[in-house]
Amino acid sequence: MNSGIRKIVFFLALIGMVYLGWAYMIKPANAELVVRRAQLQKDTDKLTEIEREKANAESLDEQIKQMEEAIHFFENKFPHKSQIHQVLSQVTEIISKYGLKPKTNIALKPEQSNGYIELPIKMQLEGSFNSFYGFLLELEKLDRITKIRELEIKNDDKTGGIVANFTMSIFFQDIKK
């Protein structure tokens, strides 16, 4: 054989070896690499999602703890049914402190709700506007939850002051222990 033909045969054999190496080794390895990269990306995404959910769970735990503290705080603001007379005496003291004259005090039917009872009291007070305003500010400072509804203030021409008609609600717990 001539050296030119040998070179061509050798060159063709070399190209055949390269093709066979690519077809049977490199191409399957690249396909496997693509599959593994896709699986790795999927696992990485799942891990990121798990970490995000874990952070959300920790955040929820903190929010639950804060909500429990808030519930405890507000439960402490609701007197027990047996302590309702203490709240009423505090309101009466505030009325006397500001020199207001109670004309009517009518306890209405208590209304039961989820976890508390609302006791509405229809009141009518006479006195100066500044005294009534002081009464409202002092009432707001009480440790217990109260609510003023249906407030109507009129001038009293006889005394030169005001007459305030309103419904005050006192909220309390009805705990049976």
Image: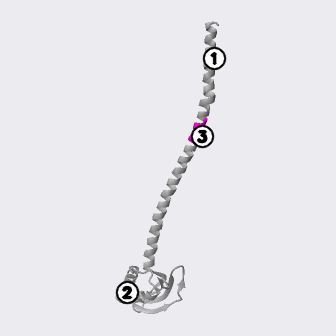
Pick whichever, 93 or 154, lies toward us.
93
Amino acid under disc 3: Val
Cα separation, mark 2 vs mark 1, equals: 110 Å
Counting from the top left corner in percent of width and height, residue 22 is at: 61, 27
Residue 81 magenta: no
The residue that appears at 57% across and 40% down in the rendered structure is 36
Q: Magenta segment range?
A: 31-37
Q: CA distance from mark 3 to mark 1?
A: 33 Å
Give the CA separation, mark 3 to mark 2. Answer: 79 Å
Tag 2 and tag 1, C-beta contact below 8 Å: no
Q: Could you tell me which residue is drawn at 43 percent across and 79 percent down? A: 77
Q: Amino acid at mark 1?
A: Leu
Q: Secondary structure at mark 1?
A: helix
Vertical order, 10 against 173 (above or below): above
Q: Is residue 113 left or right of residue 82?
A: right
For this orientation, the residue located farthest to the top is: 2
- Residue 71 location in percent, x, y? 46, 74
Q: Where does label 1 land, which residue? A: 12
Which badge, 3 or 1, comes first in the chain's sequence?
1
Q: Which residue is mark 2?
A: 94
The prevailing secondary structure element of the residues shown in magenta is: helix
Q: Could you say which disc has been placed on residue 35 in the image?
A: 3
